Amino acid sequence: MLAAEPAIACDGIVKVFGSGTDALTILRDASFVVRHQEFVSILGSSGSGKSTLFRFIAGLLKPTSGHIKILGREVEGPRDDVTLMFQNPTLFPWMSVLDNVLFPISYRFGRPTREQQAYARDLIATVGLAGKEKFSPSQLSGGMQQRVALARSLVRHPRIILLDEPFSALDEMLRENLAIDVHRILSKAECTVVLVTHSISEAVLLSDRVLILAGAPASITDVVAVDLPRPRTVATLDHPAYADACRTLRAAMRRNFQEAADV
Ligand SMILES: Nc1ncnc2c1ncn2[C@@H]1O[C@H](COP(=O)(O)OP(=O)(O)OP(=O)(O)O)[C@@H](O)[C@H]1O
């Protein structure tokens, strides 16, 4: 029965921070669904409520009204099968790469089993860091640290992964390469992915659909399907559909920006 449900369903989400004269409505009737194994990006200007929406999906915060369902069940708190990856890798500096990747297991269940350790090593190899298991985070570049964070996100086999601007601290070439690698790894892991980003080009490169969160209070104003084949590679950047989707999104973002300025 659950397989027929979308991976994520947000319905009529409203969020008001504060109360009385200090009340500030951030989100108004934000609704969308994400299908199983879909890669969806949420694009929006700074302060539109993207991270707040993520905190609802991750079960870290409750909306003022509306419903969020994960795999058919109302979200009531953090779930083991939903994981978040942030802009900063937030690794423990005193732990090795391997211990950082295993942390979600050791924190919760104590000493990882041999199989779990072997899986963590596999993940480290998958993210391109084979041989660096004993390194400490300070011996790695920012991009490598983000790869460790990705391996850590996957160590407990999540079904849904929420990426909150995970590439924004990196320079452009590194960002593109890492984004393509992440897409390949998450597709192989059969994850459903939601990415929050400010970058139109990154959203198009990675996504099956891009949602625009705009307005004050914000809601989903536009949904743009990206008709590009998987796997996404650097060649995707030269595909005519890539340029078309970027153009469509840029026009929609400009329209939203103009409407906000006219208010
Ligand atoms: N706990 C809180 N109390 C009051 N206001 C909050 C709280 N958390 C977020 N906000 C406000 O809600 C709005 C949306 O914040 P949010 O971080 O979700 O935006 P965002 O789209 O992720 O922004 P950015 O792209 O800059 O990260 C902002 O105006 C922020 O100041």
Image: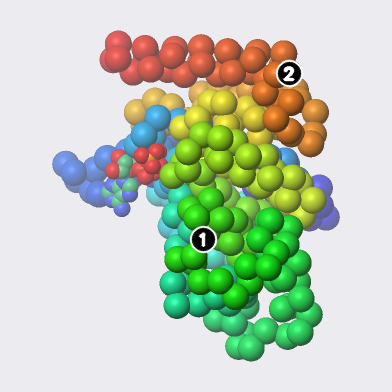
Q: Residue 119 carries which label?
A: none
The answer to whether residue 80 is seen in the rendering is: no
Quadrant in which residue 106 is drawn: bottom right
Rate crowding at label 2 as few (under 14), some (14 to 19) or many (20 or more) other CA atoms within 10 Å: few
1 or 2: tag closer to the N-terminus: 1
Query: What residue is shown with label 2?
Result: 239
Which quarter of the rendered picture does the N terminus lie within?
A: bottom right
Give the number of the mark in front: 1 or 2: 1
Which quarter of the rendered picture does the C terminus lie within?
A: top left
**In-image side of 55 versus 124 (left or right):** left
Residue at point 54%, 65% (across, down): 78
Give the percent coordinates (x, y) of residue 66.
50, 45
Please say if 9 is above or below 132: above
Give the percent coordinates (x, y) of residue 190.
78, 51
Rate crowding at label 1 as few (under 14), some (14 to 19) or many (20 or more) other CA atoms within 10 Å: some
Q: Residue 140 carries which label?
A: 1
Q: In which quarter of the image is ligand 1?
A: top left
Q: Measure the C-alpha gap from mark 1 to mark 2.
A: 34 Å
